[in-house]
Amino acid sequence: METKPKNDLTIANLLDEDQPPAECSTIAAQNTAVPFPFLPLYSQYSFAQRLKSTIPFSKLFFSNNIKPLNQTKAAAEHPEITHDKDQCMFLLKLDAQGRTAAICYLPTRVKNVIEVYHTEIPPHHRHKGIGDKLVKACLLWAKESGTFVIPTCSFVRRHLDYNGFQNYDPVIVRNEQEAQNKAVEHF
């Protein structure tokens, strides 16, 4: 007879009843497994609630709502990168075998503030500047759309530390409160 571990992380165990549902796609809402248990402080800050309806990276190839970036500076500089707003990610198709790199984000409780939480690049395609392209496209989109970015992804943080914040300083914030303060300053 199998017994379930006491600390089995599931969406049902971690849901915050007061938290509104995430704005990402609801296609995977039936999935009860916690998609990212490795994130620090996962059960705090309602990450589980916000990730509840996000499709896991392994299932992203089944999305039928992937659109190219709008005709913006970001699209002009990175024509091969697509922005899937329903799945909250920027995608870059790498080869004919279907390998894809992505940078994933989540909407926060504050309008026009996103949290960039993960960058995924297949092992054979790493160290070729693909992650840098994805970060630049994401930050250019944020700058053009007036969206603030909380970079919690370690890769994005290293990219910003190495390349400097100068070009993206207006959109990079540490938390939602800082984003609200910057928004008030601009108006």
Image: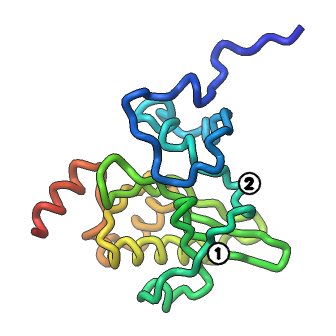
- Relative side of 9 to 151, left or right: right
Please tell me whether mark 1 sits on a helix, a strand or a loop: strand
Q: Amino acid at mark 2?
A: Ser
Q: Mark 1: which amino acid? A: Leu
To which residue does mark 2 refer?
A: 58
Q: Label 1 belongs to which residue?
A: 92
Q: Position of residue 30 (x, y in %)?
A: 66, 38
Q: Is residue 143 above or below residue 14?
A: below
For mark 2, does the 10 Å Cα neighbourhood hold few (<14), some (14 to 19), or many (20 or more) residues?
few
Q: Position of residue 115 (x, y in %)?
A: 42, 54
Q: Is residue 70 above or below residue 85?
A: below
186 horizontally vs 12: left or right: left
Say if mark 2 contacts mark 1, CB within 8 Å: no
Question: Which picture quadrant has residue 157?
Answer: bottom left
Identified at 47% across, 33% down, the residue is 41
The quadrant holding residue 141 is: bottom left
